[in-house]
């Protein structure tokens, strides 16, 4: 979501007049679509791995314990997806900090050179 929102803002933000929040919303849409596709892929792979199906009757599926288990499973899946979606922050922050540190060092060099060679 973060990377998608950042790219949407960079590519279309100025051209379409998108705010950072609008870009973030579109990034969230992209993330949700990818999450749905990933869920379907996990279900297909679980069948290929030979994991057993639930074998619940339609009546059992609508019972409160089944609904709770479904909700808890979805919450866990969404939570894991959100945490994985934050992974780019581990790299974005470092890159930005290095850039700012280089700019600050260059500015200090210019200031030091100005002090050594007064006009």
Image (cartoon, rainbow, N blue to C red):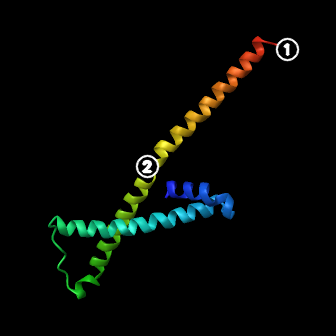
Instruction: Answer with left or right where residue 19 lies relative to residue 76.
Output: right
| Pick the front one: 55 or 97 | 97
Q: Residues within 10 Å of mark 2 (few under 14, many from 20)?
A: few
- The residue at 77%/17% (across/down) is 114
- The residue at 35%/65% (across/down) is 38
Cα distance between the residues tagged 1 and 2: 50 Å
Q: Earlier in the sequence, mark 1 or mark 2?
A: 2
- The residue at 27%/77% (across/down) is 66
Q: Position of residue 21 (x, y in %)?
A: 62, 61
Residue 83, compared with residue 68, is above or below; it is above
- The residue at 60%/57% (across/down) is 11
Residue under label 1: 119
Residue under label 2: 87
Q: Position of residue 68 (x, y in %)?
A: 32, 74
| Pick the front one: 56 or 66 | 56
Q: Secondary structure at mark 1?
A: loop
User: Quick check: marks 1 and 2 in contact, CB under 8 Å?
Assistant: no
Residue 20: which quarter of the image?
Answer: bottom right
Q: Secondary structure at mark 2?
A: loop
Please tell me whether mark 1 or mark 2 is closer to you in this view: 1
């Amino acid at each position: 979501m973060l990377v998608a929102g950042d790219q949407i803002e960079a590519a279309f933000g100025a051209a379409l007049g998108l705010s950072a929040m609008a870009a973030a919303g579109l990034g969230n849409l992209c993330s949700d679509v990818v999450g749905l596709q990933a869920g379907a892929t996990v279900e297909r792979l679980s069948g290929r791995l030979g994991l057993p199906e639930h074998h619940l009757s339609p009546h059992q599926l609508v019972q409160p314990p089944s609904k709770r288990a479904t909700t808890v499973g979805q919450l866990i899946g969404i939570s894991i997806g959100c945490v994985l979606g934050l992974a780019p922050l581990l790299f974005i922050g470092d890159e930005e900090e290095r850039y700012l540190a280089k700019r600050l060092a260059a500015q200090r060099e210019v200031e030091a050179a100005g002090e050594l060679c007064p006009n």
